[in-house]
Image (spheres, rainbow, N blue to C red):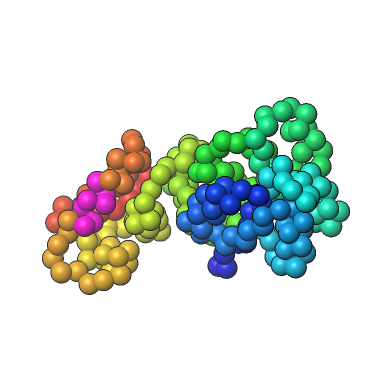
Amino acid sequence: MDKLKILVVDDESRMRKLVKDFLVNAGYQVIEAQDGKCAVDIFFEQQDISLIVLDVMMPQMDGWQVCREIRNYSKVPIIMLTARADERDELQGFQLGVDEYISKPFSPKILVARIEAILRRTNQITADDIIKIGSIEINKAAHLVQIDGKTVDLSYKEFELLTYFAENQGIALSREKILNSVWNYDYFGDARTIDTHVKKLRSKLGDKGDMIKTIWGLGYKLEE
């Protein structure tokens, strides 16, 4: 699947970098714009922007004007970022067709989760990208795991390991097979790498960690 493209618009370079880093880690392609005029130009040049993260207060053209310009031609999802938690601003945003409104400072992980939810709602993330096992939801496109709607902070390998278990639910997996599939190298007799990652993964999943069963003398399997 091609990476979905997200336009991040903010006049603060540090804020753009923060948002970009989290979105890239979540599996998205990110285009940056440093002001509203640049954002509008990029949007109409690119033609394939899946979602816009848009700051309100910017030089040249503020976020409200950007939203008006784009809404005249497109229903692309827009998330507004603002340093002002003002109810009137929020109402204005929704009246202009903003999909989500987030006040600064905010959690980048929550922003990624909101983006993922909007893209699912607009059918830009397909069912093939989502794996559900009980209350665990794995979003392969966004590289995001949630339990009961709450995001679980996993490392890259922990995410890959959980996804591999989930895609082979109920199947006993040897350590050799896990290493070859998740780590992509041959097994040389040292199982500590897998055992260490499974231990950390179980801990981060809380009481859901019990779903990862140890198969003595072989490896592991995940079952609901």
What residue occupies the far right of the structure in this picture?
72
Quarter of image, res 56: top right
**33 or 191: nearer the eye?**
33
Q: Give the percent coordinates (x, y) of residue 181.
A: 32, 67
Position of 66 with respect to 158 (left or right) is: right
Q: Is the magenta stretch mostly helix, strand or loop?
A: helix
Position of 180 with respect to 62 (left or right) is: left
Position of 67 with respect to 192 (left or right) is: right
Q: Give the percent coordinates (x, y) of residue 61.
A: 78, 50
Residue at image x 31%, y 58%?
171
What residue occupies the far bottom of the structure in this picture?
186
Residue at image x 79%, y 44%?
64
Residue at image x 22%, y 66%?
176
Quadrant position of the N terminus in the picture:
bottom right
**57 or 24: nearer the eye?**
57
Residue 141 seen in the figure: no
What range of the chain is rendered magenta?
A: 193-199
What residue occupies the far front of the structure in this picture?
59
Residue at image x 50%, y 54%?
21
**164 or 97: nearer the eye?**
97
Residue 206 part of the magenta-drawn span: no
Residue 197 part of the magenta-drawn span: yes
Quarter of image, res 193: bottom left
Q: Give the percent coordinates (x, y) of residue 11.
A: 66, 49
Quadrant position of the C terminus in the picture:
top left
**41 or 71: nearer the eye?**
41
Give the total number of marks visible in the rendering: 0
Residue 102 seen in the figure: yes
